[in-house]
Image (cartoon, grey):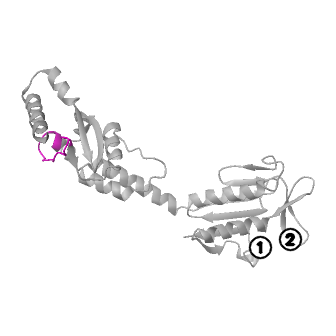
């Protein structure tokens, strides 16, 4: 089966190289090719694989590079079959489009190097550098009073995903204690603003409803953030307002991993 397939493909390639007929040449370019990459089968057009001259796949298609066949007569490439999906999509689209949360940049760079796709290599590295830069940039969440933004708490962290988790947790805690959710407070990308954010006589800032029904203290939300950070492997770098004298009394917390 393998020998028959090789002979048939060789005859087809010879016709493509020797033919001056435009229609025949087009048929050769759009001919379907099946690749077995690490056990995963992919079917695409020859012209897709030949998009980048001097690449590994272009060399295989034009018989400049030897590629073995599997038992079914498909080209066999001993590489990561799952990651090849992104290699093939890059050839099809001409740009790097990866799913949200993709974490295998280093592996994809290695695949780009193997297939001799410099453009893919550069696209992955550029994306990787942007992600690392974003991770280094400190993001924050502000919990504040709708009427007086000087009252409240800011949580700083160099991990945007963690800020999102803290935000979701604080909203959940507040929601469980607010009958009128979400009317009692409004939410934006980095700010949670409570409608009624009042300071008690002993200095403890309280979150209350309009009828003065107690909901929770700001310290409760602060401890929720601290405990969640410690469980996720972060450490409290410093209180950004040391004049308050303690973490409980500070207006800002800064977490780092």
Q: Is residue 55 visible?
A: no
Tell me if label 2 and label 1 are in contact, CB under 8 Å. yes
The picture places residue 188, in percent across and down from the top left corner, at: 68, 49
Q: Give the range drawn in magenta.
A: 60-74
Residue linked to disc 1: 249
Label 2 CA crowd tier, 10 Å (few <14, some 14–19, many 20+): few
The residue at 74%/72% (across/down) is 250
Q: In which quarter of the image is the N terminus?
A: top left
The picture places residue 181, in percent across and down from the top left corner, at: 79, 48
Disc 1 element: loop
The picture places residue 16, in percent across and down from the top left corner, at: 11, 29
The residue at 38%/45% (across/down) is 96
Residue linked to disc 2: 203
The residue at 79%/62% (across/down) is 151
| Furthest-right residue in this view | 211
Indicate whether 77 appears above or below 28. below
Can residue 69 be found in the magenta stretch? yes
Name the residue nearer the viewer: 119 or 70: 70
Indicate whether 156 appears above or below 242. above
Disc 2 element: loop
| CA distance for labels 2 and 1 | 9 Å
């Amino acid at each position: 089966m393998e020998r028959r397939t090789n002979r048939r493909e060789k005859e087809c390639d010879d016709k493509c190289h020797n033919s001056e007929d435009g229609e025949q040449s087009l048929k050769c370019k759009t001919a379907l090719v099946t690749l077995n990459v690490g056990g995963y089968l992919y079917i695409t057009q020859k012209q897709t694989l030949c998009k980048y001259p001097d690449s590994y796949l272009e060399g295989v298609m034009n018989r400049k590079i030897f590629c073995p066949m599997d038992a079914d007569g498909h080209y066999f490439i001993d590489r990561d079959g799952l990651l090849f999906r992104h290699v093939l999509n890059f050839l099809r689209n001409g740009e790097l489009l990866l799913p949200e949360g993709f974490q295998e940049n280093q592996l994809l760079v290695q695949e780009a190097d193997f297939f001799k796709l410099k453009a893919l290599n550069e696209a992955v590295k550029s994306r990787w550098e942007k992600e690392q830069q974003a991770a280094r940039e400190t993001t924050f969440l502000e919990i504040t009073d709708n009427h007086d933004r000087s009252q409240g708490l800011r949580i700083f962290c160099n991990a945007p995903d963690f800020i999102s988790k803290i935000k979701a947790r604080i909203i959940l805690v507040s929601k469980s204690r607010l009958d009128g959710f979400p009317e009692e407070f409004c939410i934006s990308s980095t700010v949670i603003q409570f409608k009624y954010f009042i300071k008690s006589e002993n200095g403890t800032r309280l979150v209350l409803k309009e009828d003065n029904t107690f909901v929770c203290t700001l310290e409760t939300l602060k401890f929720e953030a601290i405990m969640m950070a410690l469980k996720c492997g972060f450490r409290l770098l410093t209180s950004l307002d040391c004049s308050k004298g303690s973490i409980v009394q500070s207006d800002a917390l800064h977490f780092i991993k």
